[in-house]
Amino acid sequence: MQKINLRDLYPDVYKTDVFVDVAEEVLAAIRGQQQDAAVYERRKFRHKAHYSLNREDGIENDALNRPHRGR
């Protein structure tokens, strides 16, 4: 069992640290999803998916204003 902080996963819901024990399989699934999301964001930016069709849906802002992380 591993401890995770729910505040890291759900910052809008949990304003303070809440630690829970999760199984290794659950932790692996969470980390896999986080890695997939990071890969998707890199690929979206790399392939310049910040075009706009003037639908005002903000896709260009999401791609251009993404936070830069030092990883």
Image (cartoon, rainbow, N blue to C red):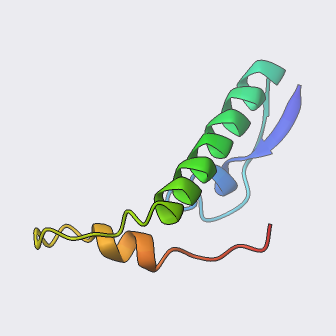
Q: Which quadrant of the figure has residue 8? A: bottom right
Q: Position of residue 34 (x, y in %)?
A: 65, 45
Instruction: Say which residue appears at 57% left-offset and 53% top-offset.
Output: 10
| Image quarter of the N terminus | top right
Q: Position of residue 27 (x, y in %)?
A: 76, 31
Q: Nearer the viewer, residue 31 or 9?
A: 31
Q: Which quadrant of the figure has residue 48? A: bottom left
Q: Position of residue 63 (x, y in %)?
A: 42, 70
Instruction: Say which residue appears at 79% left-offset and 43% top-offset.
Output: 4
Q: Position of residue 17 (x, y in %)?
A: 73, 58
Q: Is residue 54 above or below residue 36?
A: below
Instruction: Say which residue appears at 37% left-offset and 62% top-offset.
Output: 49
- Residue 61 in the figure: left or right of residue 40: left
- Residue 3 in the figure: left or right of residue 48: right
- Residue 10 in the figure: left or right of residue 23: left
Q: Nearer the viewer, residue 19 or 56?
A: 56
| Image quarter of the C terminus | bottom right
Q: Is residue 5 above or below residue 33?
A: below
Q: Residue furthest right?
A: 1
Q: Is residue 25 above or below residue 65?
A: above
Count the labels in the image: 0
Instruction: Say which residue appears at 53% left-offset and 63% top-offset.
Output: 46
